[in-house]
Amino acid sequence: MATKLIFPGVHRLTLGAVNVFFIEDEAGPGLVLVDTGYAGSEQPILAAAQQLGRAPQDIRHLVLTHCHPDHAGSLAALKERTGAQAWMHPADAAVVRGQAAMVRSTTSPGLLNRVLYRLFIQHVPPFVPAASIEHEIADDAVLPLGGGLRVLHTPGHSAGHVALWLPRAGGLLFAGDACSHVGRLSLSIVYDDHAAGRRSLAKLAALNPPPAAICFGHGGELTGRGVAHFRQRWRAVD
């Protein structure tokens, strides 16, 4: 599977319906990986790193937006293959460590979301292979990765969901599953807490200055007018 350069020093790898992202770390030769896909995704991720001219050990940090199986499923396997350290909000880190049960989220309104839930989520086991998390991250923390990766706690899709702000080149927002952009900008299929998810989207829409680009756990990127649409769409809790 080929990666796509979506921003200076940032490459997207699409694994079925979910995206993971490689960030070239400005502080050195290593890579930061945002999210890890479903269980069993480690081999295509390592192959993609090789296409970028990197060895497995060059993936030095794994930053998780949240604990769901399509984002944290290959964390344990990648840690074993690469020796990378993991970064995650404590509320979701407890799930990945096997210390807390994964919440069964409720479906967003609409027939399409109910259908997608039955197709892609309902029968997925609500756990991921247990893995250690070396670094717990909090809202507004600036991680020493990628030139200063800022954490934005955005609960709703899960209790410990985070978005990430990469400051280079005008700013790239990793929105994770705060919402999705599969064909159109829409709510994610499920949320643990829909009201909290709406508040988190309003928080992201109010970022000042606005990002130059936004990427998502599901779907393509937004730039230019797309970013303006994102801000207009989510600027108020409704």
Image (cartoon, grey):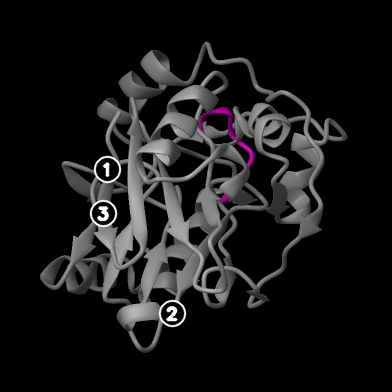
Callout 1 secondary element: loop
Amino acid carrying mark 1 in the image = Gly
Q: Is residue 69 magenta?
A: yes
Residue at mark 3 to residue at mark 2: CA–CA distance = 17 Å
Q: Is residue 198 magenta?
A: no
Residue 63 visible at all: no
Q: Which mark is residue 5?
A: 3
Q: Give whichever of 8, 115 is nearer the camera.
A: 8
Amino acid carrying mark 2 in the image = Pro
Amino acid carrying mark 3 in the image = Leu
Instruction: Find residue 2 and report its image quarter.
Output: top left
In the rendered image, the vertical position of residue 167 relative to residue 138, given as above or below: below
Q: Position of residue 1 (x, y in %)?
A: 30, 28
Q: Which residues are magenta?
A: 63-70
Instruction: Find residue 115 and report its image quarter.
Output: top left
Chief secondary structure of the magenta portion: loop
Quarter holding the C terminus is bottom left
Tell which circle, 1 or 2, labels the residue nearer the N-terminal end.
2
In the rendered image, the vertical position of residue 234 relative to residue 3, given as above or below: below
Can you tell which of label 1 and label 2 is closer to the viewer? Answer: 2
Q: What residue is shown at x 52% (from left), y 69% (from top)?
A: 146
Residue under pointer 2: 167
**Mark 2 nearby-residue class (10 Å; few <14, some 14–19, many ≥20):** some
Q: Residue furthest top?
A: 123
Q: Give whichever of 82, 154 is nearer the camera.
A: 82
Residue under pointer 1: 219
